[in-house]
Image: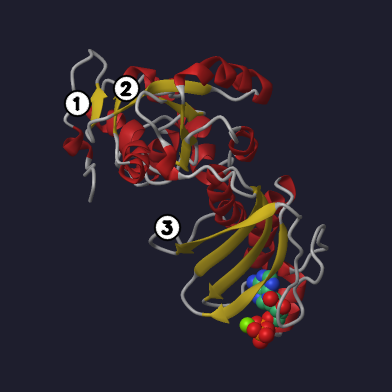
Amino acid sequence: MSEFDLIHQHFTRPTRHTNLSAGDDAALISITKGMELAVSADMLVAGTHFFADCDPYQLGWKSLAVNISDMAAMGANPRWATLAIALPEVNEPWLAEFSKGFFACADDFNVDLIGGDTTRGPLTISVQIMGEIPAGKAIKRSGAKVNDEIWISGTLGDAAMALAVMQQRFDLNSSDLNKIENALHAPQPRVKLGQALHGIASSAIDISDGLLADLGHILKSSKLGAIIRLNQVPISNIVHKNLHLKQVKNMVLAGGDDYELCFTVPSNKHAEIENLSKTLNLALSHIGHITASTDLIVHGLDNEILDIKETGFDHFN
Ligand code: ADP
Ligand code: MG
């Protein structure tokens, strides 16, 4: 199979909102009037970001989903993606499954794959995503204000726990693992939430590296601090029943790969966020507030102040 056949077979699908798609030297797109283009890229390297022998369908889904999550965090509507992929060999069944997962995610979020590059090399997947956002309305990391409330979507810690089980750093029965492993393999980017937060949220970020690290980015960009409470951080039942373990507290506070949104809102918008949670049928939890001092303070289950250095978290490094 030639490189062109491979691209045609696995990475070419009809597009929905693209003037000229893959097949020429460049793709052509038109941006809706009054919109800004939001652009972001994320690379996944075998052995670093995923296991080389992982399920190719899930890998395809996740490589696009993590990029869409960056659009969600800006409040952008994801529209177009490119895919640059290095493959050690041409493995037809693997490629078929990978592209099935990738396009399943593209279909769910109405994203057109409009081009890319395919080459031989150590398995590496690099996706660039482009989305639209009403001009001037992007939700940046730098907009948090003193006394703003800090909110989290969904639950945190499931992905980190599933990864720890796979790496035999944590023990869980298979039925419990079943309930949480989707968080790791099939993250759901919070696009609707991000777009609904225009004009409400003062800042937002998606949680890819862990709550403390990513909230830390908001604090650094906004030059402020925060107080949060572990017992208000939303977690699944499985994480909850193990929360007495320090290792599990760390999964909630510092585990990555959840792809939930962390955002700040002025306190007079509290009821609006509660309503949004109902409209979107998505749990939204108020976990703390922004402070003028630049410290990040975390209260533990008995209201004690946690030593967050122990989570491996290093505020501004
Ligand atoms: P060029 O030599 O101009 O870089 P390529 O041979 O690399 O062109 O690619 C041919 C066409 O196929 C281009 O339009 C490119 O965008 C598209 N393409 C290549 N690889 C991929 C891929 N993995 N996914 C989607 N489109 C791809
Ligand atoms: Mg090329």
Q: Are marks 2 and 3 in contact (CB under 8 Å)?
A: no
Residue pointed to by mark 3: 49
Residue identifier under label 2: 230
Q: Quadrant of residue 283?
A: top right
Quadrant of the rendered image containing residue 127: bottom right
Q: Which numbered disc, 2 or 1, marks the residue that appears first in the sequence?
A: 2
Which tag, 2 or 3, sits closer to the chain's start?
Answer: 3
* In the depicted structure, whether residue 212 falls above or below residue 240: below
Could you give the CA–CA distance between mark 2 and mark 1, rounded to whole angstroms? 9 Å
Mark 3 or mark 1, whichever is nearer to me: 1
Disc ID at residue 306: 1
In this view of the protein, which residue sits in the foreground, 148 or 47?
148
- On the image, which quarter does residue 191 sit in? top right
Q: Which mark is residue 57?
A: none
Q: Position of residue 259 (x, y in %)?
A: 49, 41
Q: From what the image shows, is residue 172 above or below residue 165? A: above
Sooner in the amino-acid sequence: mark 3 or mark 1 = 3
Report the quarter where the N terminus lies: bottom right
Q: Marks 1 and 2: in contact by CB < 8 Å?
A: yes
Closer mark to the observer between disc 2 and disc 3: 2
